[in-house]
Image (tube, helix red, strand yellow):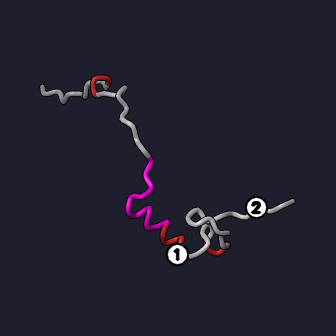
Amino acid sequence: MSTAVRKCPICKRPAEAALAPFCSQRCADADLRQWLTGGYAIPARADDDESDDDLPPAPRDSED
């Protein structure tokens, strides 16, 4: 059986066990910097199917 060597997601060199999944502290810091500055983002799309018209009316406070 062959063991797969994981590659660093930043530079593609073999990952170090102590810094997995990265190969160095430099690559780990580069990844953190991407997260902190908004470099990684999940694209969103507007959901046109939902609107406030579909919601039930809010309950009213009864004043006697």
- For image coordinates 53% across by 70% down, the residue present is 28
In three-dimensional space, the C-alpha distance between marks 1 and 2, rounded to whole angstroms, equals: 23 Å
Does 17 appear above or below 63? below
Q: Please give the count of numbered marks on the rendered protein.
A: 2
Three-letter residue code for mark 1: Arg
> Which residue is the site of mark 2?
4
Quarter of the rendering occupied by the N terminus: bottom right
> Which residue is the site of mark 1?
26
- For image coordinates 73% across by 64% down, the residue present is 5
Q: Which mark is residue 11?
A: none
Q: Find residue 7 and report its horizontal and vertical position in percent.
A: 65, 64
Within the image, what quadrant is residue 56 found in?
A: top left
Three-letter residue code for mark 2: Ala
Question: Disc 2 on helix, strand or loop?
Answer: loop
- For image coordinates 37% across by 32% down, the residue present is 47
Residue 32 inside the magenta-drawn segment:
yes
Left or right: 7 as drawn, with respect to 55? right
The residue range painted magenta reads: 31-42
Quarter of the rendering occupied by the C terminus: top left
Q: Find residue 27 and report its horizontal and vertical position in percent.
A: 54, 71
- In the foreground, 39 or 46: 39
- For image coordinates 60% across by 69% down, the residue present is 22
The outermost residue toward the right is: 1
Left or right: 18 as drawn, with respect to 33? right
